[in-house]
Amino acid sequence: MKRCLTGFLALLLLLSLCACGEPQQTEQTGQEPEETTQPEEPPFDPVVPASQAVSADWFQDAAFIGDSVSVMLETYNDSYGRLSSPAFFCSVSLSQTGALTYSAGSERLPEYPKGSGRHPRLEDGVAESGAKKIYIMLGMNCIAGGVDRACQDLVTLIDEILAKSPQAAIFIQSVTPMTADSPRADDSLNNTTIQAFNTQMQSICQEREWYYVNVAEALSDETGCLRADLSGDKAMGIHLNYDGAAAWTDYLLTHVPEALK
C-alpha cells in the first residue's frame, strides 16, 4: 500500500512540473544597463582665430595696456577711430615689472583719464574705466632680464587687475618682433627671446583660459622679423609706423572670439 501511495505522489509531482512548462522569460535580462558617458570637452584653445570683422563699437568697453609700441596704436586710433574709443593705458618704457613697483602718481604710469594729470596704478585705472575686455602687450622692456621672470610678473600684474575687474576678459597680445637690422638687438633682447616669451605666455593663456591674440604674425616677414615697411624705426627697429598700426588694427578687428560676439 505504501509503495502505491509513494508512486502515486511521484506521478502527481511529475505531472505538476510538466503543467508548469518552461519558466517564462521576463523583460529583465539580468544585465546591468550600460552607462552613458558625456563626451569630454576639448581643451581650451587660447589662440583667437580669424573671423569676420566686428564693428568698431565692439572695442568701446575695452582697455589697452602697453608700452611705446602700443602708444603708436593709441595715436593711430586717436586719428582714425577704427577701434572706437577704448581706454588706453600705454606709456613709454612701461613693463609688467615696473608696473608692479611704481607707486600711484608716478609719471612712468599711464595718465588716466587723459588730461587729468593723474597716474593711477594700472589695476585702479582699469577698474575705473569699467573695461570688460583687457588687451595687454607688455614684455619688450623687461624680457632681457629673463623670460621666466617676465612671464611671472605679467601673470602677477593680471591677477591684480582681475582682483578689481573680475568680470573682464583677458587678451594677451604677442609682443611684436624687431626688424632684421635692429640696432637694439643683442644677446639678451632679440627675436628669439621675444618668441620664447610669446610661446610661454601662450601656454599660460591655455592654463588660465585667457585669450591669446597673435598680432605679431600680421607684422612679421617670412623670417619672423618685423617688416621694415611697417616700422620705419631706424634707431631701434622696434616701433611701428601708421601702416603697421593699421595692420595691427585690421588684425584685432578680424580676431575676436565667437563666444564674445
Image (cartoon, rainbow, N blue to C red):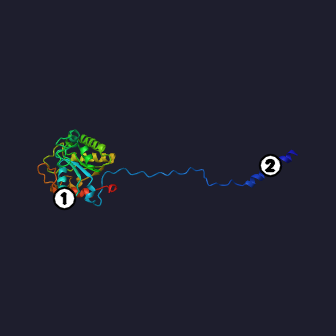
In the picture shown, does residue 39 fall above or below 120? below
Of all residues, the one furthest to the right in this rendering is 1
Mark 2 sits on what residue? 10
* Whole-percent x, y for residue 135 in the image: 26, 50
Closer to us: 161 or 3: 161
Q: Which residue: 19% across, 53% down?
A: 74
Q: Which residue: 83% across, 49% down?
A: 8
Helix, strand or loop status at disc 1: helix
Q: Crowding near pointer 2: few (<14 within 10 Å), some, many (20+)?
A: few
The residues bearing labels 1 and 2 have C-alpha atoms spaced at a distance of: 107 Å
* Whole-percent x, y for residue 177 in the image: 20, 50
Indicate which disc, 1 or 2, sits on the residue closer to the N terminus. 2
* Whole-percent x, y for residue 2 in the image: 86, 45
In the picture shown, does residue 237 fall above or below 53? above
Of all residues, the one furthest to the front in this rendering is 116
* Whole-percent x, y for residue 247 in the image: 21, 57
Q: Quadrant of residue 207?
A: top left
Closer to us: 111 or 108: 111
Q: Quadrant of residue 251?
A: bottom left
Closer to us: 189 or 120: 120
Which dot, 1 or 2, sits closer to the camera?
A: 1
Which amino acid lies under the numbered mark 1 shown in the image of this protein?
A: Tyr
Helix, strand or loop status at disc 2: helix
Of all residues, the one furthest to the bottom in this rendering is 52
Which amino acid lies under the numbered mark 2 shown in the image of this protein?
A: Ala
Q: Is residue 235 left or right of residue 85?
A: left
Q: Tell me the tag on residue 128.
A: none
Mark 1 sits on what residue? 80
Q: Crowding near pointer 1: few (<14 within 10 Å), some, many (20+)?
A: few
Closer to us: 173 or 7: 173
